[in-house]
Image (cartoon, rainbow, N blue to C red):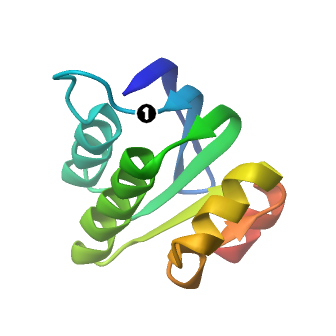
Amino acid sequence: MHWTQIAQRNAAGVVILDLAGQMTLTGDEDARLLRHVRAVVDGGYKHVLLNLASVSYVDSTGIGEIVGAYTRVARHGGMLKLCNVSTRVQELLDAANISAVVQSFATEAAALESF
């Protein structure tokens, strides 16, 4: 994945992952987001919020990584949600029917209240 950064912070018992860059896979790069979410879940956290405010583009591989992260958290009895999703990225999630499974919120505050 092409990422500028994945920054982690906590708020009200929720791990917030601030993502920046493009969610695309090129070459033989590994699934960095999945690795990070795995570490969060293995650390005992069950509520994860992906903040996509600084994500400029998502391709099918990026969507697959979001689904994989959601599945990882859900298998451990938790919930993964999205916030600050751009209109273009939301359209892609809707087209792939991801929005039927993974909830997205316009703001971080609204997402945090939903946990």
Q: Is residue 20 left or right of residue 46?
A: right
Residue 30 quadrant: top left
Residue 51 quadrant: top right
Question: In the rendered view, would you say 90 is above or below 58?
Answer: below
Instruction: Estimate the x, y position of residue 72 in percent, counting from the top left.
Output: 25, 63
Quadrant where the C terminus sits is bottom right
Instruction: Estimate the x, y position of residue 8 in percent, counting from the top left.
Output: 50, 31
How many residues crowd around disc 1 within 10 Å: few (fewer than 14), some, or many (20 or more)? some
Q: Is residue 93 left or right of residue 70?
A: right
From the viewer's side, name the closer residue of 76 and 99.
Answer: 99
Kindly identify which residue carries mark 1.
Answer: 24
**Which type of secondary structure does the marked residue at label 1 adopt?**
loop
| Residue at point 22%, 21% (across, down) | 27
Instruction: Estimate the x, y position of residue 102 in percent, counting from the top left.
Output: 53, 73
Residue 84 visible in the shown view: no
Quadrant where the N terminus sits is top left
Q: Amino acid at mark 1?
A: Thr
| Residue at point 51%, 71% (across, down) | 96
